[in-house]
Structure formats: structure tokens, C-alpha cells
Image (cartoon, rainbow, N blue to C red):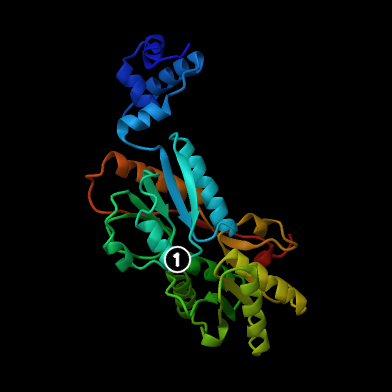
Amino acid sequence: MRVSLKDVAERAGVSIKTVSNVVNNYQHVTPAMRARVKAAIDELGYRPNLTARNLRKGRTGIIALAVPELGNPYFAELAGAVIDAAAEHDVTVLLDHTRGDREQEVLVSQGFRARVIDGLILSPLELEAEDLRGRDDDVPLVLLGEREYDLPYDHIAIDNVAAARTAVRHLIGRGRTRIAYLGERIDSANQPAHLRLAGWRAELTEAGLPAPDAQVGATGGWDRGDGAEAMARMLDSGVRPDAVFAYNDLVAIGAMRVLHERGLRVPWDVAVVGFDDIAEGRFGAVTLTTISPDKQAIARLAVQSLLNRLEHPEEGPGRELAAAYRLIERESTLGRR
């Protein structure tokens, strides 16, 4: 026999509306009342009819997450966190991958899946503000990443300049004075790369250390091979840094491989800091010091922001929401303890 909201309300001794508020995860229910209703739900084995609920609201119960690369460990870990956060609200996540291509990002943002999804979380690399100003799709949109758009959409990011400065400050504190940056993109407007470069330069300048262009390594992408190629070119040019701050962990891992092949020891000859705190960096022969964005917080903020926009489409302009980050110190700057 199917258990109804009325059955749960009678068991908990509350109104059907209160049970509905708990089932729909409304925030104004007191913790004591929420616990009471959940105990009745567990006891009776109540399961909400999600299809009926979504039909009443004119929704599908599905949101989309579009990222540049599902093969990139950072985005894979972020996708997992978004799926977990959405599951807490009985929402299914449809994954899409844009390859960091501007045309594909425009296509996704313009709602080509509008009849399938209730909302979109988009992490763009090349999308420009002008691409979104003419957006006529009424599906709610939440933006992730460090590009600055000044548009009426909720935007969740960490402070890339401050995070980069934290990484460089750590290296300076370890006595490093010739600190290179790997990950500049000359052929791209990608803002995170430019913001992290700006943080690198600002921290070195404040410390009175040189920040010459020769210590900046450009990459065609941000994978392991790109980091290896950039590190090799820098060493071949005669530049010999005593530390490297890399755009992300994959670039850092590629750079560390080349340093090993050239007989340079990490961290004694060259210290290395990455960015993203992917699992691979924790299990290499030399574990990687890195900037760790709070992926779970980013995911929770993204899902909650999207659901809030669905419930309250009349709310004001888009909000800038900051997620936390921290520096995790490991062997690539500290050595083995």
C-alpha cells in the first residue's frame, strides 16, 4: 500500500502542509519539527512521487551541468559534487561537455535543451559577456568559474588573484626568489589564466622580486603534456627557476616530470605549487602542494542558487557568490618529512 502525505502527517501529529514543507526541503521549518517529520517518513517508508510533484510545478526534475572537459580531474570531481548536492533535493543532473569551445558554450547557454531541463549550471572558458546579453531563454542559469561577466546571473567563483598570491607567498616564504609561472594563454581570453598570472606578478612585485617575461611559460592547453612542454622550453631557453607556480595541477605534474628527467630535484632544486587539488596530486612519487578550491561548497552554492531562481524567478539581479580556497602544503615544496 502506498504511503501518503496524510499518513505521514497523522503519524507525526502535524499538518499535511508541514510534511510537504519538509519533503520539499523548505527552509522555514524548525529543526525539531523537521526531525519529527523525517522520523515518521522513515518509520512508514514514505517515498515522494517525484513525477507528480514535477508535473504540478511544470518541471522535469532535471538540471544540466556543462563543463569544458569531463576528462579533466577537476571538472570530474566538481561534477560528482554537483550530482551529490542535487540528489539532496531529489534533482537529477544531466552532464554536458563543451570542450571549452565558444560556439558550443553559446549553444548550451541559449537553451538548446530547454524542454528537457529546469535550469543550467555552466562553467565556461571562452564565453564572452556579449554572448549572454542577448540570451532569450528563460531557463535559469548559474555561472561557475572566474570570468567576470557583470550580467544578471548568479556567479560562483573563488578569488583567483588572491589564491595565486597565496601560492607565490608560500614559495617566497620557503626562500625561493626565481619563481616561474606556467600556464599563460596568449591565444585565449581565458580570464582565470590571466588572473592567476596577475596574482603571481603582484606578489613578486610586492616582495621586491623580479617577474620577467622569461619566467612566464605559455601553454596551448592545461594538461600534463602542456606543462611538460612549457617547462622544457623554459629550461632550454637558459632560464633556471628555483620554483614554479602552475595554472593547475595537471600542468604542475607535467612540469615535475620534465624536472625529474633533467636531473632537477623537487623541491630541493625547484619547488612546485599547483592549483585545483585533484586526487592525482596526492599520490605521485612527490605529492603536490596546491591551492584547493572548496569544490563541495561550489557545488552546493550552484545547486541552491539554481533552485532558488526556480522558486523565486522574480528575485533581483545576479549575485556574486565567493567560495573558499586554501593552500595545502605537501612534498613538492616541503620535501619529505
The front one of 59 and 154 is 59
- SS for tag 1? loop
The answer to whether 55 is drawn above or below residue 107 in the figure is: above
* Quarter of the rendering containing residue 333: bottom right
- For image coordinates 43% across by 21% down, the residue present is 35
For the point 56% across and 72% down, the residue is 221
Residue under label 1, please give it: 125
Q: Which of 107 and 25 is in front in this view?
A: 107
Q: Where is residue 196 in the image (x, y as percent from the top left)?
A: 48, 71
Closer to the camera, 236 or 306? 306
> As drawn, is 244 to the left or to the right of 205?
right
Q: Mark 1: few, some, or many residues within 10 Å (few <14, many ≥20)? A: many
Q: Vertical placement of 225 versus 152: above or below?
A: below
Decide if residue 26 is in sight here. Answer: no
Above or below for 96 versus 148: above
Residue at x-position 58% and y-position 60%: 72
Q: Where is residue 18 in the image (x, y as percent from the top left)?
A: 32, 20
- Residue at position x 54%, y 67% in the image: 167
> How many labels were placed on the picture?
1
Q: As drawn, is 328 to the left or to the right of 62?
A: right
Looking at the rendering, which quadrant does residue 183 occupy? bottom right
Residue 208 in view (yes/no) = yes
Q: Relative to 199, does residue 137 appear above or below in the rendering? A: above
Residue 164 in percent (x, y) is at 49, 68
Quadrant housing the C terminus: bottom right
Residue 179: x, y in percent?
58, 78
Amino acid type, mark 1: Leu
